[in-house]
Image (cartoon, rainbow, N blue to C red):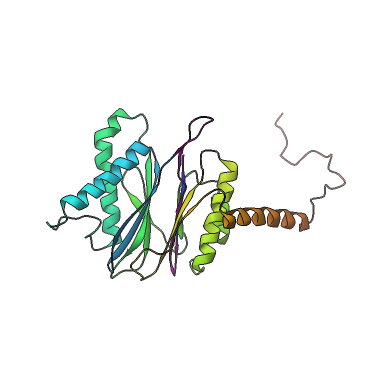
Amino acid sequence: MTYCVGLRLDRGIVFASDTRTNAGFDNIATFRKMHVWERDGDRVLVLLSAGNLAVTQAVISNLNEQIDAHRDDGEPSLLNVETMFRAARLVGEAIREVKKVDGPELEVFAASFILGGQIHGEPPRLFQIYAEGNFIEATKDTPFFQIGEHKYGKPILDRVARPEMGMGDAAKLVLLSFDSTLRSNLSVGMPIDMTIYERDSMKLGAQRRIESDDPYFRKLSRSWSEGLRDTFGRIESFEMSEDATAPLPFGKAKA
């Protein structure tokens, strides 16, 4: 399994992905799930992948071969389309092409992607692309997308994520989302790849691979646990009423 997050802000986009693909007592594999395409001064595109590794790698290979094949003839590729919407459509088409070839042989065709970045002439945009090749775009009401094992890291994103956040706070929030997921699911594992893209920079910003012994991540995890316990302790305890032994009002049974 895996866990990936893309968080779109007014100031840019934060991307993060884990690197675990198999988990077991004697079978743990690590693969990079963050893929980047750049053209200086014109565009930065980041693609996060989750699902069957063979399927997602085939999609990435199709996109790269498309770039090489159409570098000079003007046919669409991630390095020459005019909008992020068109880029998302290219990823969707690549997924469908892989599904056409490999899908009939697979019991489950599992693949999902987060595509984000900026192309000159439009603001940063973020998309979630499904196994069917269709997609949705992030909005101010829903500024983040998750793929993979997302349920453990979603509550804090729902409560805290805001488009007006600073990039540093957003990166901290994404890492807390990962910390919650890592504590609750063995199939998600470190290291974590994180990339920050700042609006209108047209170049990739800070990139970092966060290992399990990373000092900041360990401090963040410890501080978050201590903060939760402290807040829990300061909330008034639930008290049972005097008639707590009375039956709960679920309604009367029919005769």
In the image, is residue 146 part of the stretch drawn in magenta?
Answer: no
Spot the residue most to the right.
Answer: 242
Q: Quadrant of residue 53?
A: top left
Name which residue lies at 55% across and 60% down. Answer: 172
Residue 91: in sight, yes or no? Answer: yes
Percent position (x, y) of residue 209? 47, 53
Q: Say how many tags the image has.
A: 0
Residue drawn at the location 29% of the way across and 50% of the way down: 91
In percent of the image, x 41 and y 59: which residue is there?
Answer: 138
Residue at the extreme left of the image, as rendered: 73
Of residue 137 and residue 234, the one placed in the foreground of this image is 234
Vertical placement of residue 239 versus 165, above or below = above
Q: Which portion, as a residue range, is magenta? A: 8-29
Residue 162 visible in the current orientation: no
Residue 159: percent from the left, percent from the top? 58, 59
**Image location (x, y in percent) of residue 241:** 84, 48
Magenta-span inclusion, residue 28 = yes
Residue sitting nearer the eye, 22 or 181: 22
| Location of residue 252 by image quarter | top right
**Is 236 in front, or is 232?**
232
Q: Which quarter shows the C terminus?
A: top right
